[in-house]
Amino acid sequence: MLDAAKSQAPLVQVRGLKMYFPIYTGLMRRHTGDVKAVDGVSFDIMPGETLGLVGESGCGKSTVGRALLRLYEITDGSVVINGTDVASLGPEDLRKARPQMQMVFQDPQASLNPRMTLADIIGEPLNEHTDWNADRKLARIYELMDAVGLNRRFANRFPHEFSGGQRQRIGIARALALNPRFIVCDEPIAALDVSIQAQVVNLLEDLQEKLGLTYLFISHDLSMVRHIADRVAVMYLGRIAELSPRDALYARPLHPYAEALLSAVPEPDPSRAQTRNRIVLQGDVPSPANPPKGCNFCTRCPKVMDLCRSVKPDLVEVEPGRMVACHLYSSDSMTAGSTGATEAKERSQQGESL
Amino acid sequence: MTDTSVIEKPRNQWADVWAQFKTHKGAVIGLAVFIGLVFFVSLGPFIWTKDPTYINPNAAEMIKTRNKPPSWEFPLGTDQLGRDMLARMMKGGQVSIAVGMVAMSISILLGTLVGVMAGYFKRLDGPLMRLTDLFLALPLLPLLLVMVMLFRDPLARAMGPEGGTFLLIVFAIGVTSWMQAARIVRGEVLALKEREFVLAARSIGTPPRRMILRHILPNVVSPIMVSATLGIASAIITESALSFLGLGFPPDFPTWGRLLFDGVDYIQQYPERVMWPGIAISLTVLSVNYIGDGLRDALDPRIRGR
């Protein structure tokens, strides 16, 4: 599937995306700094692909998702979706471009207007972007409700009358109303309990198969991302640490942060859980308003080198399809002969034997 | 499983609102009382045809009919000039209810407009809120005095003494009482604006105008209702205070507030003279409060159907 996708042009192309939130302090409310929520993120998403975006709380995952849909005015960079640069569109052009990109939100309770009926909520995109008559809209609303597995009788009800899983289905139906090509799923399952999570994720997969959708799937649930994503980007403090195909990443994470993150996934088999190597990171995430000078991860990295504290590593392709932002894998540090470099060699040898 | 033919079409929400409103006992009683009061002041004068401003020109006769207790000839008694209280209550109620409703509408309209604009558009927030603070800081009575001085005569010439004064009073009360509503609405809008459903509407591409009408306003209806119902009461009271100071309607022109102030001088001898307008004002305010309460509950789908 990946090879097939490679031959096409990417549907979503993000280059150097930066999203800074200004900080104003003091009596004069002077601009004294920025929270660098997203600091130079680049990736591509192929048509029909699901890119998982994982990372801990506050690393900028949701901000990337919202910036992609221009729900924030981005500080710098470009977001090309289906050939149009969303980041630089004027208000009216942006409105016309909205139907091709939609979003499913994290909290299904908060993302539905409590004073609108289900039919009104799902029909809102149709009201905004089509000039259909009431009957045709209603037919489309029923069609969407069927597609996400909601009973047609519910059309008159209000969001508070539904369970969390049903509400999330309403959110998905609303996102699908205009036949989008690209959907940002911003932690769509985080607020649901486990049995419902599986239903919603399977629904998303079915819809992807039927409608050829492309997802950016933002989550902190690593096992769910493993289930749905084709490729996975690991974010840390506003930057992508590693961007790899799913299987390769889960089998052998390259970036030390990805390695630590994946080692935190609970292991269901108790005997294997006892023997596995759990990497516990020390310290806290630095403030995004004042990130470290070098690599963002250098304050907590178990394999930190001198170089890491002074130079920010770029996201480079170290193996086919695998991009890592770490000095362990860049050619400079290989020749520097530090301990990190030798370990990197060992690791790549292990990789070949796999 | 589902047969499409049996599914009813999405129905009009106002039917649900009315159904819920009917279950709120206080609101239904309030509505009945309020309609009764409106009928009393609007249709009453056609049944009870005494002239509310009639003073017997014969001084001896006039003195005989002064300060009468309730009787069959004067069901609510007479005032210190022998005018029939029932007729005056009806006539005064017309003005008081009209002033209360119209002034409240103006102040709520202004307050909501300013509040929504300030809360939704960040650029307008500073200027509009400073304007609100400015109005709050203004001493209202001198301001009203100046307004009446400047505009009463031109308006009276253009629209007749009663129409002109009515317009002036309603406008004066309206533009000096919208600030509380504006502040409350702004606060609510600021909180609502950050909710995810507003973000969802933006990702759909809903323009600000429809965003406000569809997502913001229906969700700030509760505080607006509350300040609206309280606003009627304060508008009626403010009107009576203005009349008392000689800034409102002419002294012989009855309003409930005017009757109240006239009666205060005689409260020891003839307490019923204060009670009639007092009861009428209280009933109006109370019934409107209950209607507002019921309406607020009926408009909230989370409460509806319980």
Image: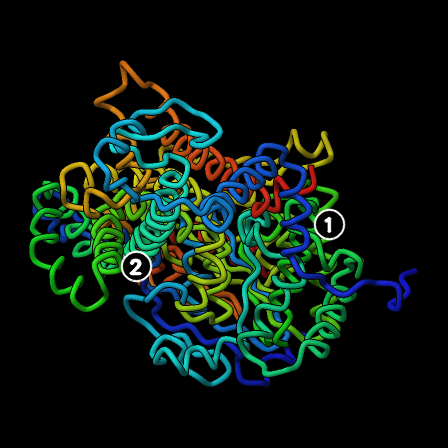
Q: What residue is drawn where x is 42% and y is 29%? A: B76
What numbered label is drawn on residue A163?
none
Residue type at the position of mark 1? Ala
Q: Which type of secondary structure does the marked residue at label 2 adopt?
A: helix
Q: Can residue A310 be seen in this view?
A: no
In the foreground, A234 or B188: B188
Image x and y of residue B181, in percent: 32, 45
Number of on-image labels: 2
Image x and y of residue B161, in percent: 21, 58
Left or right? Give the position of A316 relative to A180: left
Q: What residue is drawn where x is 18% and y is 54%? A: B126
In the foreground, A353 or A99: A99
**Quarter placement of the N terminus of chain B:** bottom right
**Quarter placement of the C terminus of chain B:** top right
- The alpha-carbon separation of the residues under discs 2 and 1 comes to 43 Å
Report which quarter residue A67 is drawn in: bottom left
Image x and y of residue A234, in percent: 48, 55
The residue tagged 2 is B117
The residue tagged 1 is A198
**Which chain is home to disc 2?**
B
Left or right? Give the position of A184 relative to B252: right
**Which chain is home to disc 1?**
A
Of all residues shown, which one is farthest toward the top?
B268
Q: What residue is drawn where x is 49% and y is 54%? A: B218
Nearer the observer: mark 2 or 1; the answer is: 2
* Crowd tier of the residue under label 1, counting other residues whose Cα lies within 10 Å: few below 14, some 14–19, many 20 or above: some
